[in-house]
Amino acid sequence: MDVYVNQKRVRLSPKQAIGKGGEADVFDIGNQTALKLFKSPSHPDYQGLSQEQQAACDRLTLHQQKLRQFPAHLPTRVVAPIELAMDKTGKTVLGYTMPLLQGTDLLLRYSDRSFRQAGISQQTVVQIFQDLHDTVSKLHFAGVVIGDFNDLNVLVQETAAYLIDADSFQFGVFPCQVFTARFVDPRLCDPQATQPQLQRPHNVDSDWYAFAVLLMQCLLFVDPYGGVYKPKTASPQVPHAARSLHRITVFHPEVRYPKPAIPYKVLPDELLHYFHQVFEQDRRGEFPRSLLDNLCWTTCIHCGTEHARPVCPDCMPAGGNAGTPGHGNPEMLVRGSVTATRLFCTEGVILYATVQQGQLKWVYHDRGKFYREDGSVVLQGVLNPHLRWRIQGKTTLLGYQGQVVSFQSGQPAERLAVDSYGAIAAFDANSSNRYWIHDGQLLKNTTAPALLASHSPSIGEVLPGQTRFWVGSHFGFGFYQAGELKVAFVFDAERPGLNDRVQLPRWQGQLIAASCSLSSDYAWLFLTTQVQGQMHYCCVVIQADGQIAATAQARAGEVHWLVMLAQGGAISAAPYCAAGEFFLAATDEGIIRVEIRNSQLVHTRTFSDTEPFVNLNCRLLPDTDGIYVIGHQAIQRLKLG
């Protein structure tokens, strides 16, 4: 497609695509500049969807005036329009150019405990929100309201927080007409609805409400209305999606606090009191800057708890006497029909684990070094959430910034150039082979990649910079999407060639997360998307021949196993144990089993006796006579009687 910027033609191709949302596609047009192109009513994503087609038409009509009157001299952290992108006649606005940011992460990732524990401290989060606070204050001073303020329109670069999607800002006669259910101020919504529905315009106070939600979920890994509400009485029934409308927060005595979340007792009383007032008593106004400036995190030297209080909340109940550091479970525990045996624990963090040829292998970090399961040192260094680890037998693979480094005891490290999907190096491995993408070719070899890169057999051609893929012991699966293009494929783990005729169900909106677990026969693909401010979850089971075996879909707030898994960020972490025509997943209530039945995915059983040993953030791997449970700092083997 061609657009015109300053009367100069700009030709856009899928290879330039760097982002895809529900309303627009984003392209890298060079010179550190991105171009945001609004989807037209005829866009393939809207095919057969009359409501979305009309919304696209209305959006383009609005932007003919709104973008021409966009306020100038906004804070430097706002990724604002630079030039308008027009059609050939120069009369119709199709989009706009903006600065292209490099090396950023969505603020959403900072509420993911797995991402954070790989090297981002709580104090770093405080600095990010101090920076964001300055920008929000300056925007309000300029007469601009963010409106749809959420964790997908904030990009973080080290400790700098940038606001994107500026075209949705509210200013002058142009209201912000969109909202995200998790962050919208309930005072502006219909109090009788079953989920938030915006009735009144966004305002300055609603921006600060969203700021408080963002801060809480990044500090505690749970939003104000997270957890499970289980009232003692049968009525009145309040759907999960409507809890904000009734101010039923995680502080409510009948809400079960999520296991993966950090206990809120680690926060200072002043901040806790403020959260109570905002989310339960409708306090509004600018977020007090002093609550951020006085927020100082420390780690207890006695028990290791990270907190922001004058005294450690875990040691304090014992009269201030230090507790003895420990790792929780003893060597072996029995609960009903379940026997749990602890195999490994560390004061550091477990970064990656896999089962290859019946053997459990893992990588962990402790005290400045990265180790394998046998205690051998892979390399020295600090934690970094952008490092991606894989294992091929005795070889350890590390991906970072467009390259993969191969480590094996007694041999020099070897390097391999790879394409990246965003900040993620595009590679994977099984016990026999390593796979990677370079210059749009999916490649494979069995030995040193640096030595054989030029002779490595190509499995097939994919879209560079836009392809995600996963590989199992027998086959692999991947997909790419860019602009109007969406392709999914499967490939044999040993033979060249890929089948790119996999017909995935069409999804709408912005793709937030994708993960995949593979057994010998099936690939279990999990997708999280956001559509009109609401999270949607999908599971697709793909056979090795590319046929779809089963699907399941759910929306946030529904009573569904997909929604339950998503509450702990599980869908982005792929912690599932795929085996045959079923998979197992960890929840706060125990391990659940989901099976393929007549092309449907059905939650058939909950192993309640496993509840003490698992939570939503655990990863599960298959064992010959049980299940491995991979936590952040411990590995257990569970045997189910």
Image (cartoon, rainbow, N blue to C red):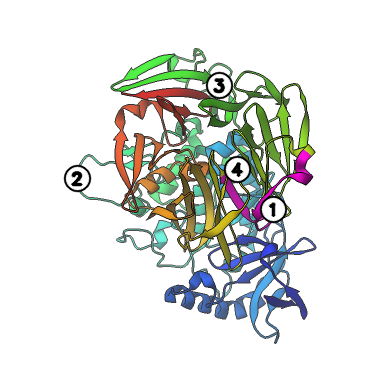
Report the residue marked by disc 4.
494
Residue range highlighted in magenta: 452-470
Q: Amino acid at mark 4?
A: Glu
SS at circle 3:
loop
Real-space Cα separation, disc 3 to disc 1, in angstroms: 46 Å
Question: Viewer-proximal residue, 86 or 636?
Answer: 636
Report the residue marked by disc 3.
304
* Quarter of the image where the C terminus is located: top left
Q: Amino acid at mark 2?
A: Ala
Q: Mark 4 or 3 closer to N-term?
A: 3
SS at circle 4:
loop
- C-beta proximity under 8 Å, tags 1 and 2: no
Q: Is residue 466 magenta?
A: yes
Question: Which numbered tag is attached to residue 234?
Answer: 2
Report the residue marked by disc 1.
441
User: Looking at the picture, how far across and down is residue 307, in whole percent?
Assistant: 54, 29
